[in-house]
Amino acid sequence: GNMIYGFVGSFVLFFVIIGGLLFLLLWPISQPLMISLLGWGVGMGITTGLKMLLTMCCRSSSNRAFYRNRPAAANMYQLLLECWNIGLGAGVMLGRMLQFLLASAFWLGRIDSTFLSDEVEMFGYKFDYVPMHFRKEILVHEAHRHPFLDRLSGMYLMRLKHGNNFGSDAGAAWRNLFVLGLMPWLLKYRVDPENIDEED
């Protein structure tokens, strides 16, 4: 019974959404408003596409994975994009609302999967990418507060400040033993002095 009524409900909702939009677009009284809304949507889509293209170009030049290899440039374009997002915020909200309406029209009849789960996609397109982008932004900002990087940077700065009074060969050997004993996967990143001498 649920499958039949779910299919009927999905068909009715899809018919109401598409039929209502076509009716408002073709009705002479609402046609000027719908054409202006359509133009606004096309303009917002072009602006959002330009923003995505600019974001990809900036991230490829100043980021490496989640780490900023050029922090000043990354901070500058992040500030510019945040200012741009103030204007695009309403469009993103309306776009998500329209996507959820269309997704509900398609997925109302599906009783075998949770609505808006990771399985809800159409031709490889997932309907809600905003939470994934939000998690990416958190990871980009938190990558510079990693405890390992903070500790290693602190050791290098202390070595620069105190010179030979900070650290010793015996301490470095014990540190290597602890690091390689607790994190053996770091062996593949360790520089071998013999290979360096052979290459030179």
Image (cartoon, helix red, strand yellow):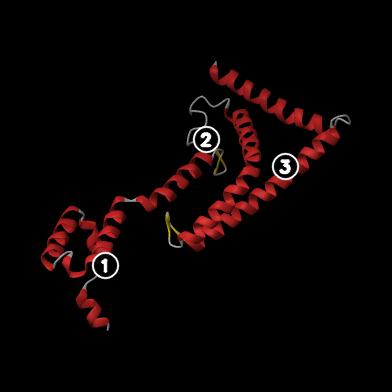
Q: Amino acid at mark 1?
A: Leu
Q: Amino acid at mark 2?
A: Val
| Along the viewing direction, whichever of 148 and 126 lies nearer the viewer | 148
Residue 33 lies in what quarter of the image?
Answer: top right
The crowd level at tag 1 (other Cα within 10 Å; few <14, some 14-19, many 20+) is few
Q: Is residue 124 above or below residue 116?
A: below
- As drawn, which residue projects farthest toward the right? 28
The crowd level at tag 3 (other Cα within 10 Å; few <14, some 14-19, many 20+) is some
Under tag 2, what secondary structure?
loop
Residue carrying label 3 = 41
Q: Are marks 1 and 3 in contact (CB under 8 Å)?
A: no
Answer with left or right where residue 36 lies relative to residue 76.
right
* Residue located at (63% from left, 25% from top): 10
Image coordinates of residue 17 in percent, x first then y, are: 71, 28
Residue carrying label 1 = 160
Q: Report the mark closest to the observer, 2 or 3.
A: 3
Answer with left or right where residue 147 lies relative to residue 132.
left
* Residue located at (63% from left, 28% from top): 105
Answer with left or right where residue 63 lies relative to residue 128.
left
Under tag 3, what secondary structure?
helix
Q: Report the mark closest to the observer, 1 or 3.
A: 1
Residue carrying label 2 = 120
